[in-house]
Amino acid sequence: MAKMMGKNFLATVKMLGVKGNADAHLTPDSLIQRSSEAISPFEPFIEQIPTTKEWILEQFSNQINPISYFQRLFPFIGWVRRYNTRWLIADLIAGCTLSLVMIPQGLSNAILTNLSPEFGLFTTFAGASLYWVFGTSKDICVGATAVISLLVGKTGTSVIENHPKFTLEEVAKTHAFLAGCVFLILGLLRLGWIIELIPHVAISAFVTAAAITIALGQVPNLLGIRDVNTRGPAYGIFIDICKGLGRIKLDAVVGLTALLLLMSIKWLFQYLAVRKPHQEKMWNTLASLRLSFTAFLYNFISYLVNRNAPQEEFKFRILGHIPTGFGHIGPPTFQLELVKSLLSELPAIVIVIIVEHIAIGKSLAQKNDYSIVPSQELVAIGAINLAGPFIGAYASTASFGGSALLSKVRVKTPLAGTFSAVILVLALYVLGQVLYWTPVATMAALIIHAVINLPTSLDELRKLWLISPPDLVIYIVGLLASIFSTLENGIYLTTALSACLILVRLLRSQGQFFGRVQVQQYPNSRTRSSVTVGAPFTWADPPRDTFFRLDRKDASNPSIYVESPRPGVFIYRFPEGFNYVNQSQHMEFLLAYVTKETCRTTVLEYKNPGDRPWNECPSRPQETSDQPGSETTKPTLKALVFDFSTVSNIDADAINGLIVLRKQLERWSSPETVQLHFASVDDRWVRRALAVAGFGYPRGRELEAPTPWNQVFSLAKKKAMETTCTALGESLVEPSRIATTMENPENEQSGIEAAPMSTGQLAVTHGINYPNFHVDLTAAVRAITVFTTEDGI
């Protein structure tokens, strides 16, 4: 029954004109037989084009094994079994040191969200207690950061303006939960590669603008200026600060001296680290503790100054009462109205969290000689942002300061975060009364000091200009948009401009025609001591062919002579890939160039001028064979070689463009044929697409030509062999029939003559059923040379 249904299905398919083998109806019947005879005595290899089923299987080549997938989700399983005492001591020291930095940093960053300071500790605790379970970096510290805190604060203000019935806490917790859902989905689906779609220039502009906005927003607290709107654009904050300079209070003394102290301590220990490099670790650790030292120092000073005064007569503003413990435990708010209002705010924070986290993780991993798994890192920050809101945390990501500290103190495993989490719990229950006296100006100084080094330096901008001027323009546009509008608009604009720049490059990519140059390595053992300036030079070893651009708009020496491969033969390379976006431009440019540099094989004559097509220009009668560049001195079109070394995928529009071009070139060269050869077509699916369209093998007219068509194949050493060999000797095969592409540069330079190899030691590199696909340009040009030479060209 099944067989009958199968036969009926095949019969129906044939009636509809659909063929089972896509390229069977295009490949000439005699091609494989002739190719097999030509490759003799070597064993033929028939290339099978991949099927659609194979393509589907390739997309899911990494089949999900439940056990291995589970282990990848919890990477700590791999190292926790090897945990030892030395790791424990190192992680304990690192965790305790980290907590002394993250406590003041969490408290100060929470101010940017317009929430109570303890929310910063909740956020840092969530990251410290959960990251080790899912993370793949030993150096990353997840917690409250200045940039993310600023975005959370702006989001909360924006949502509450439109929906005043919600609180800032509800907005922040739901905001973090939704972001965590996005991260977790991307991580579980292993879509970490999507991070590469976000350009670095967009993040650089955003971070710089965010640092400027954060610093300006904290200047009023630093100087004690009241009634300044810090929720608007950066330029508006700056104007309001200038207007309020006359209202500076005693807070300025506290804030400015705290900022000066922080900068002095940092400079001092950096200086000592340079002068005494053998104690660099100690100096770096002490420098990292400057935040805690400054916070507790001014906390003590504030206590001494204000302890006997009523609250309304305090000399400067203080943090005030901080609730102890986890007093905000509870689920996020999932009201539909709130969720809808947050969706528009979600993309900006998702982009920034992902890029900031992965950038920090990759940089520290490279520094410490290991690698992270981006998809698993998305799972980690997804889990943290999903679970964190239930204890009062807002959105978080990797902290640059905390992560850098862990790296400097030589942390051993991600478990160090748990020790930091324990101390954070103690701080939440014990330090509430101590932190009561912390001056607001000191917190502002801590924030400004933390972000003061985030902006892109002038030296980096200069390098950016030298590397890519358009990227610098995009950076400046994004920076200005962020300062005069919003941070979200800035990152959206820079990302869009970067995408447009890539699209323009694809659309306007100019193809390149190549010519042949013979080169040789110099000096070598035969020429090193025997060559003098001006003396006749002979090649010690056979020169090899390479290919330079004909227009010479490259880095090669302009005095080098670049020749055409053969009269009427052209080599064309696609510099930016080949797809529907740029195929039209490539085909138009290629056709115009070829028709300009060649003449028609048969001159078209019309009895009546009205019979000439409107788009065909007549030849000028004054042109004679003595005039250079005239139609009579140009060669006829013989062959075209496409260099596919930059083409890793292809689409239907690109294939259709090649088909149309082939028809146009055949009309130009009629009644002769035009050979189309392809070099470096490595991707199987590109080869399949070309084969289905009738490329990769000679057309019927070429096979039926009066002059016999000769194949040229490339041979290589079989993988089972262990001996070293060079090019196949002429004594083994007839060079007019088979060309090899085997080379051994070491033997060439040393002058060692390689012994000929037997036919059983060599094999054809690619399928003989696609002889017009070649391993490289040299093989393609040789194939054309053999054919055109036998035609007497």
Image: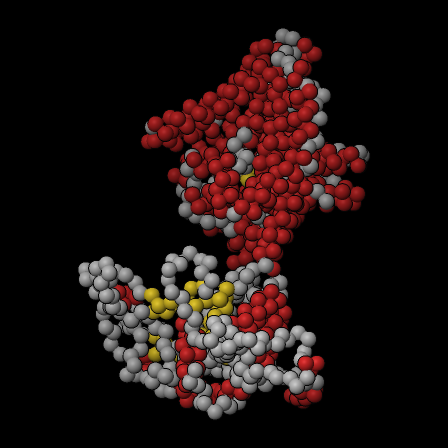
Asked whether, in this view, residue 282 is left or right of residue 678, the answer is left
Asked whether, in this view, residue 736 is left or right of residue 695, the answer is left
Asked whether, in this view, residue 162 is left or right of residue 478, the answer is right
Q: Residue at x 42, y 34 (%)?
A: 409
* Residue most extreme to the front: 622
Residue 721 picture quarter: bottom left
Whether residue 762 can be seen here:
yes
Reply above or below: 483 against 21.
above
In the picture, which quadrant includes the N terminus?
bottom right
Reply above or below: 379 against 684.
above
Q: Nearer the viewer, residue 658 or 34?
A: 658
Q: Nearer the viewer, residue 67 or 639?
A: 639
Q: Position of residue 514 (x, y in %)?
A: 46, 67
Reply above or below: 739 against 388.
below
Q: Residue at x 50, y 35 (%)?
A: 458
Residue 525 picture quarter: bottom left
